[in-house]
Amino acid sequence: MSMKEIFSKAWCEQLIVAWNNNPDLHKTFADAGYVIFEVKERNESRCCVLFWDKNGIMSLSEEHHKINAPHFSANIKEWYEFIKGAYSAVAGVMTGKIKYTGRMSFAFKFGAHFDHLAEVARSL
């Protein structure tokens, strides 16, 4: 998929299949719950809300406007750079390349594990 498709519904659906077919990673996000990923551009904004259940199985939610959940946002270039491994999730948030709003306890528990999500995304 192209950079422009990151966090589109079709891209997220492919990510879910790839994640769920990788059981070694499930434990890293077990019981993470809802997480909002947003692409913010001057003329466009789109969200992908992912949900991890108690077993780390990922699914897609269409209810982003109703969910108060950890929220990561960046422009398409920064998402692409993160996914291709130019920097870690923690470095992205610490440098402001990726914006994070949400509970700090969530960030501390799961923050470094988002690098696994980038690894799976690179396979798409």
Image (tube, rainbow, N blue to C red):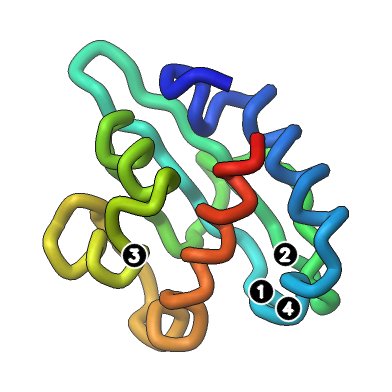
Q: Residue at x 50, y 50 (%)?
A: 36
How many angstroms separate mark 1 from mark 3 (CA)? 17 Å
How many angstroms separate mark 4 from mark 1 (CA)? 4 Å
Instruction: From the image, tell me which residue sits under label 3.
Output: 88
Indicate the amino acid at tag 3. Ser
Check disc 1 and report its element: helix, strand or loop: helix
Instruction: From the image, tell me which residue sits under label 2.
Output: 52
- Between 55 and 120, the residue placed more toward the observer is 120
- Mark nearer the N terminus (1 vs 3): 1
Indicate the amino acid at tag 1. Phe
CB-based contact (under 8 Å), mark 1 and mark 3: no
Q: Which residue is drawn at 44% across and 27% down?
A: 46
- Residue 105 picture location, percent across and down: 41, 87
CB-based contact (under 8 Å), mark 4 and mark 2: yes
Indicate the amino acid at tag 4. Ala
Indicate the amino acid at tag 2. Trp
Label ID, residue 30: 4
Question: Does residue 89 appear left or right of residue 23 in this picture?
Answer: left
Instruction: From the image, tell me which residue sits under label 1.
Output: 29
Check disc 2 and report its element: helix, strand or loop: strand
Label ID, residue 85: none
Q: Nearer the viewer, mark 3 or mark 2?
A: 3
